[in-house]
Image: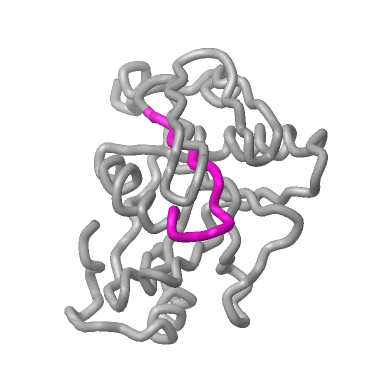
């Protein structure tokens, strides 16, 4: 994660971050006073994110409890790290608990989805996951590849214990919401890089 162009090398307050984010056409994350630029989403990244959100919305219709699905426009507050980050998708139980008066920041994520890329995979699997795990409400983490159909699903089993399922076919068993999603439905008709057609071809 790199520092944002246009921002001075200094420590920013949370208020300064939110003021700049409201004016910006790009998304930025806040890491304990430092502001970083979110990488631009590729067509593949956006398509996979959109499809998993669609499948989550369908799945929770039959759930035993009320859940809400949000897109990457919502930020998550990590109090222990004085950090605000964007997930690709997030599910909360019942209703979102917002950070202060900011309507785009939630503090009670139950399930978080990230679509991996070369520039973010290491961060999503390590630092960002560590940050998410500090949230008591957080119970499940779904990482989706954008190079082939593959998902890693982390289930919380205790305060510091997580179980992982690596899936290349079949269903994602989302235990936090009592639902299943078929992996093939997330990746249906996705044009992976080797199959993309350039305008110049």
> In front here: 157 or 113?
157
In the rendered structure, the answer to whether residue 189 lies left or right of residue 38 reads right
The quarter of the picture where the N terminus appears is: bottom left
Q: Quadrant of residue 100?
A: bottom right
Q: Position of residue 23 (x, y in %)?
A: 45, 77
Residue drawn at 68 percent across, 63 percent down: 96
In the rendered structure, the answer to whether residue 61 lies left or right of residue 169 reads right
Vertical placement of 29 versus 125: above or below?
below
Q: Position of residue 110 (x, y in %)?
A: 60, 51
| Figure label count | 0
The quarter of the picture where the C terminus appears is: top left
Residue drawn at 26 percent across, 37 percent down: 118
Q: Is residue 169 magenta?
A: no
Q: Quadrant of residue 174?
A: top right
Q: Position of residue 50 (x, y in %)?
A: 57, 39
> In front here: 188 or 108?
108
Vertical placement of 115 versus 8: above or below?
above
Vertical placement of 68 versus 5: above or below?
above
Residue range (magenta): 133-146
Residue at the outermost left position: 9
Which colour assignment does the render follow?
one colour
Q: Position of residue 161 (x, y in %)?
A: 43, 42
> In front here: 117 or 154?
154
Q: Quadrant of residue 79?
A: bottom left
Residue drawn at 51 percent across, 37 percent down: 155
> In front here: 136 or 150?
136
């Amino acid at each position: 994660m790199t520092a944002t162009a246009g921002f001075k090398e200094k420590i920013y307050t949370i208020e300064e971050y939110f003021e700049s984010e409201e004016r910006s056409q790009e998304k930025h994350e806040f890491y304990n006073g430092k502001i970083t630029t979110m990488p631009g989403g590729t067509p593949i990244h956006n398509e996979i994110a959109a499809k998993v959100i669609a499948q989550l919305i369908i799945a929770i219709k039959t759930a035993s409890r009320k859940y809400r699905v949000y897109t990457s426009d919502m930020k998550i507050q990590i109090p222990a790290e004085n950090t605000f980050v964007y997930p690709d998708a997030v599910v909360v139980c019942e209703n979102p608990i917002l950070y202060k008066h900011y309507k785009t920041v939630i503090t009670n994520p139950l399930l978080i989805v990230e679509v991996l890329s070369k520039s973010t995979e290491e961060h999503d699997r390590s630092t960002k996951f560590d940050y998410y795990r500090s949230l008591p409400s957080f119970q499940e983490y779904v990482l989706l590849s954008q190079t082939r159909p593959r998902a890693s699903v982390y289930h919380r089993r205790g305060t510091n214990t997580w179980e992982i399922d690596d899936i290349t076919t079949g269903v994602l068993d989302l235990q936090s919401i009592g639902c299943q999603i078929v992996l093939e439905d997330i990746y249906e008709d996705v044009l992976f890089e080797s199959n993309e057609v350039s305008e110049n071809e």
